[in-house]
Amino acid sequence: MDPQKAFGSNVRRIRKARGHSQEKLGEIAGLHRTYIGSIERGEQNVSLQNIVAIAIALRVPVSDLVAGLPEDPVTTPAPTTRQDESDK
């Protein structure tokens, strides 16, 4: 799953479990309700500062918001280097 969508899904699930509307969560976190909605839809690449604000507002550790995100989103292996003849 796309990391932004997974993050947004976690925010929505936890927000609903807390009984908050997007507007209420935005008010508590100091963010606009439309921004909360776009986060939940996976449309925003959320800053660390806002991730922390949302976690505090929802009273959960940040790790709950990033649960299920790919641990290594890079799908291509790192390039290998050849040992230079002078290194031998």
Image (cartoon, rainbow, N blue to C red):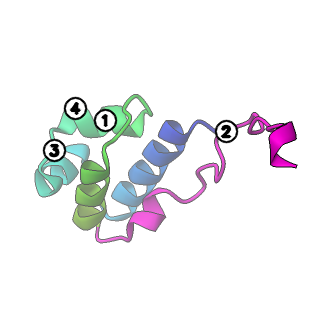
The overriding secondary structure of the stretch rendered in magenta is: loop
**Is residue 44 shown above or below 3?**
above
Q: Amino acid at mark 1?
A: Gly
The residue shown at (46%, 65%) is 64
Q: Amino acid at mark 2?
A: Val
**Mark number displayed over residue 37:** 1
User: In this rendering, which labeled residue sits more in front, label 4 or label 3?
Assistant: 3
Q: Are marks 1 and 3 in contact (CB under 8 Å)?
A: no
Q: Amino acid at mark 4?
A: Thr
Comes first in the chain, label 1 or label 2: 1
- Judged from the image, the secondary structure of the residue bearing numbered disc 1 is helix
**Is residue 46 shown above or below 49?**
above
Q: CA distance from mark 1 to mark 2?
A: 27 Å
- Judged from the image, the secondary structure of the residue bearing numbered disc 2 is loop
- Judged from the image, the secondary structure of the residue bearing numbered disc 4 is helix
User: In this rendering, which labeled residue sits more in front, label 1 or label 2?
Assistant: 2
Q: Tell me if 42 is positioned left or right of 68 in this view.
A: left
**Mark number displayed over residue 70:** none
| Magenta span includes 3 | no
Q: Are marks 4 and 1 in contact (CB under 8 Å)?
A: yes
**Mark number displayed over residue 34:** 4
Q: Are marks 1 and 2 in contact (CB under 8 Å)?
A: no
Which residue bears the numbered disc 3?
Answer: 31
Q: Position of residue 45 (x, y in %)?
A: 38, 35
Q: Residues within 10 Å of mark 1 (few under 14, many from 20)?
A: some
User: Start and end of the magenta stretch?
Assistant: 59-88
Q: Amino acid at mark 3?
A: Leu
Of residues 16 and 30, which is closer to you in this image?
30
Which residue bears the numbered disc 2?
Answer: 74
Q: Position of residue 48 (x, y in %)?
A: 31, 51
Q: CA distance from mark 1 to mark 3?
A: 11 Å
